[in-house]
Structure formats: C-alpha cells, structure tokens
Image: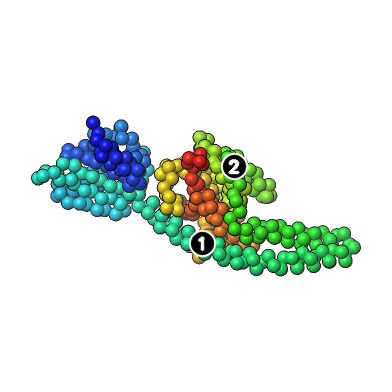
Amino acid sequence: MMTKNTETAMQLIDHLSTAVLLFDRDLRLCSINSAGEHLLSVSQRRVSGQRPDEILPNSPFFAEAIKRSLESGSICIEHGIDLTLQNEQSITVDCMITPIIDGEKYTEVVVELVDSNSFIRVMREANLQAVHDAAKISVRGMAHEVRNPLGGIRGAAQLLERELNNSELTEYTKIIISEADRLRNFIDRMLTPNVHPDITRFNIHEILEYVVGVVVAESDTGLNLTRDYDPSIPDIHADREQIIQAVLNLLRNAVQAIDENGTICLKTRTQRKVTIQNKLHKLILRIEIIDNGPGIPPDIESGVFYPMVTGRSEGTGLGLTIAQSLIQSHGGLIEYERKQEKTCFRILLPLEAGNG
Ligand SMILES: Nc1ncnc2c1ncn2[C@@H]1O[C@H](COP(=O)(O)OP(=O)(O)OP(=O)(O)O)[C@@H](O)[C@H]1O
Ligand SMILES: [Mg+2]
C-alpha cells in the first residue's frame, strides 16, 4: 500500500514538466511520469517493465548511457542528444542519469529528460516579451503623434469639398475624409489602454473560415489554400474580433509573400503541457499559417515583431506587432519558424478550464 508521503511524492513527480523515468537494477522500467509519457509518446502501461533499448529501439545511445552510468556508479549529464521515438519522430533532449545507491549496491537509476527545444523557446519567448513591451511604448507614442494632424486633414478636406461643385472631384475628398476617420478610429482603439476584451465562446474553425473569406475577397487572382483542421478542438473563450484581427494580419502577410504558384495551409492542433509566458498550460490550441513563399528577409527577421519593421515598400510594419499584442493579451504567443522551405507563423492560445 502507498504511504501518504509516497503518494504525495508521486503526485509531485507527475506534475513536473521534466520527464522522469525510473529503472531497476536490471534496467527494467519501474515508473515514468506524465511528462515522460508525453515527451516519449508512450504510455506507462505499455512500456512498464521494458528496457531502455525496447522503449527507444532506434536510439542505442540512450540505453548505452544508462548502462554506463549504472556500471560506473556516476551521474551522467548529456546536452542536446537526438532521440528517435517509436513513431519515428525525432526530439532533442538534455539528459541526466543518476544511479541510486543502497548500502553497497546500486538499486535503481533515475533518468531525467528535458526537451532542449522547449528551453530554446522559453528563452526566445522572454526575449519576445521584452521586444513586445518596447514595441507597445513606441507604437503608442507614434499613434499619438499621428492622431493630432488628422483633425486638420479632415477639416481641410471638408472645406475643400464645399468649394468644389464638381462631383467628380468630391470623390477624392470623400476618400480623404473616410480614410482619416478610419485611421482615427484605429488609433483611438490602440490608445485606449486595454479596453475590456469582449470574451465570447466560439469555434476556431468558424473564425478561420471567416478570415479566409475576407482574404479571398481581397485577392483578384484567387488563393491556393488548403486546410488541415483538427475537428475535435473544443470551443475557445476569447475576444472574437481580436482573434480575427490577429489571424487576418498573419494570413494577409502570407498572401503577400507568395507568388502565383504559392500555396497556403491553415492547420489547427491541440498540444498538451506547454509553457507560455512562464505559465504551464495543460492544453493549448495551435493555429499555424504556413506558406511556401521565400520567408522573412534575413535582414529584418530578428526584429520582425517590432513596429515599423517591414520588408515591403507599401508596408507599415505594424501587422505582426498588433497580432502579437492581441494574442499575448490572451495569455498566448505568436512564433515564427522557417523550416524545409516553408514559412510558418504559429499562434499558441491557452485552452483550458474557463477556456475550453
Ligand atoms: N509569411 C511571410 N513570408 C515572408 N515574409 C513575411 C511574412 N510575414 C511577414 N513577413 C515580413 O515581415 C514584415 C513585417 O510584417 P508586418 O505584417 O508586421 O508588416 P507589413 O506586412 O510590412 O505591413 P502591415 O502593417 O501592412 O501589415 C513584412 O513586411 C514581410 O517582409
Ligand atoms: Mg502585414
């Protein structure tokens, strides 16, 4: 029977984000925590009693390191080991192997594994947060400066309109007035500090389809767009307008990046146990906007989430800054990845109690 202490210890280990595996002296698996099951894509029930080379048959290094550590009785630490899982997926981990000694004999080995990429992501994320805070200040400053002359521009256009009796020319003054109004509304929204988000419950695919509709209407050549949706994703609780705006900014960028042979894929998935903004979430939603265009120009890649960083002559460089800001205010994050000639912008959004 489990004592109260052992039970608490097991619960604690199960809540760690580090994968922990315990092998006995014969190198048979006695225990694996939830993070371990998730990282290695196995279930405790199936791998219990198996040896390291049975759990990961395509990663002989893993079994050898555990054997060596047990034989030598010394702790072994390895960084950046590539492991191939049974489902053929590869992961890179940092690994620590600790033999446990009882009297004279080694009785068990504890193996701790941490996904190296998650550390890289957390570091990148901390950096992004700093970038984002700086961006917010400079966008607000700029917005304030732009707002002031708008009243003058609008007033002058109105006076001009009254002077012009020619209806053809008033077409232009009307554009000046309506665009000045649109810009002012936009700036007012940006300057209002954190207007209460209007949280409702909705299906993410309904939003994605709405955004696709807008982008298709804007394009005069049509779009080669594929969908890879996970239909089992639960409804999310979020500000509908803000999520639309964020996805729209990313999808427009993708459309602008591709040529006539380009393709865009919209992909949705859930993912368990993800840390965003230093908070561990049980379940998150991943929305990926993937295009096969050339990717972000290298000279602007590192600062692309800053305001006014643009690679397009007609771009304002605000699309990504605004999208990042909206998603971060939902406790989420937007990541950029360039892999196998594909450009991927990934929205991560918490999907859990109160939001799922
Ligand atoms: N999918 C993409 N593929 C290639 N480059 C991209 C992609 N998305 C963004 N970029 C690059 O990042 C830059 C910044 O994007 P961002 O949306 O912030 O501003 P913008 O598109 O230039 O202007 P706007 O404010 O009108 O959106 C773009 O100008 C482009 O060079
Ligand atoms: Mg843009």
- Where residue 126 appears, x then y in whole percent? 43, 58
Look at the numbered disc 1 and give the secondary structure of its residue. Answer: helix
Q: Residues within 10 Å of mark 1 (few under 14, many from 20)?
A: few
Badge 1 residue CB within 8 Å of ligand 1: no
Residue type indicated by callout 2:
Thr
Residue at figure coordinates x 55%, y 62% from the top left: 136
The residue tagged 1 is: 133
Spatial CA distance of label 2 from label 1 is 27 Å
Q: Which of 223/67 is in front?
A: 67
Q: Which mark is residue 200?
A: 2
Q: In terms of sequence position, does the residue under pointer 2 or pointer 1 come before the other?
A: 1
Q: Residue at x 57, y 66 (%)?
A: 138
Residue found at x 66% / y 60%: 187
- Picture quarter with ligand 1: bottom right
Mark seen at residue 285: none
Cβ of mark 2 under 8 Å from ligand 1: the answer is no
Q: Position of residue 298 (x, y in %)?
A: 49, 62
Examine the rendering and report whether any part of residue 15 can be seen.
yes
Q: Between 138 and 209, which is closer to the camera in this rendering?
A: 138
Q: Residue furthest right?
A: 165
The three-letter amino acid code for the residue at tag 1 is Asp
Q: Decide: is 49 above or below 276.
A: above
Can you tell which quarter of the image residue 210 is in? Answer: top right
Front in this rendered view, residue 155 or 56: 155
Assess whether mark 1 and mark 2 are in contact (beta carbons under 8 angstroms).
no
Which one is nearer the viewer's eye here, 276 or 347? 276
Question: Badge 2, how many Cα within 10 Å: few under 14, some, many 20+?
Answer: few
Identify the image quadrant of the N terminus: top left
